[in-house]
Amino acid sequence: MTAQAGICAEPNLHAHYLLFDILPGHHAGVVDALAQVPALWQSLQQQYLDARFSGLVAIGHQAWDDLYPDARPSELCAFPAQQQGQRVAPETPFDLFFQLRADRLDVAYIAVQKVMALLAGKVELKDERQGFRYLDCRDMTGFVDGTENPQGEDRAGVALVAEGRFAGGSYVHVQRYRHKLARWEKLAIKTQEEVYGRTKADNIEYESAQKAPTAHTKRTSLKDAAGNSMEILRQSMPWGTANVQGLVFISCCNTPLHFTRMLESMYQPDEQGHFDHLTLFTQAETGAAFFAPAEDWLSSKGDL
């Protein structure tokens, strides 16, 4: 099975994110359109070699059965919404998610127009966001983003289902965060570093014993019962306007369990009342669960 290149792609300079709902009565037409997506990704890659374009389309957990009723990824389920007082990570389901990335903004936009034409009359665009590289792959808070990401061949091992009918696919979770930067920037740099659990300027992670139990890197570095790291591949990028800034957070993994446990650890207090203090400085506005099937699945309309 050939995985969509956007799942394991290395960081780019630009991205465009599209979230759609399918119009009533148009599911068969969407299946036909999605069958053309692998060829579209290949065409854009070949036409604009310097842009390092990669595409990704993922199907929402609620829409999957209407599109591909004969088989469903075994772990595809609803987004694991969280709420603790004013700290909220809501579920906002969407039917389709597109990630279009390139090192040229014009190529990313050309990809947007190609997708819009492909799906014209079949879907309603519910949300779009432009992502961009900020400094040396930093979040708008000023800290390097994705430090924990697997590298090289390990990216596929973490992100892709290895066996079975859905091999080459990935469980994808997408959130749009809006940062509370005015509040964040009032903190001393040392305090910001304690919130993250690593230094700001040179991105050196604190030793585990030196991290506060509320540090972001402490709350999201988890192990399973066997002592194995519960990794995800992050494909996140900042977004912003003159007035608001944030992060489009994207998790790709061979199981949704790792993301679910991380989100719970961030929002749910432990027995000592500790939670991820980064959640005091950013607000999740959306949250949706998807599965990104292999290109073979899309091209065959699920007939594998």
Image (tube, rainbow, N blue to C red):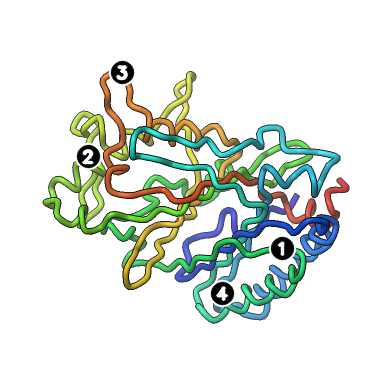
Q: Amino acid at mark 4?
A: Ala
**Label number found at residue 10:** none
For mark 2, what is the residue?
206
Query: Which numbered disc, 2 or 4, marks the residue closer to the eye?
Result: 4
Q: Amino acid at mark 3?
A: Glu
Residue at 72% x, 47% y: name it.
63
In the image, taking residue 3 as reference, residue 233 lies left or right, namely left
Q: Amino acid at mark 1?
A: Val
Q: Amino acid at mark 2?
A: Tyr
Mark with earlier residue (4, 3): 4
Q: Dot 2 surroundings within 10 Å: few (below 14), some, or many (20 or more)?
A: some
Pinpoint residue 64: horizontal percent, then vertical percent. 74, 45
For mark 1, what is the residue?
123
In the image, taking residue 77 as reference, residue 90 lies left or right, namely left
For mark 3, what is the residue?
271
Pinpoint residue 302: horizontal percent, then vertical percent. 83, 48
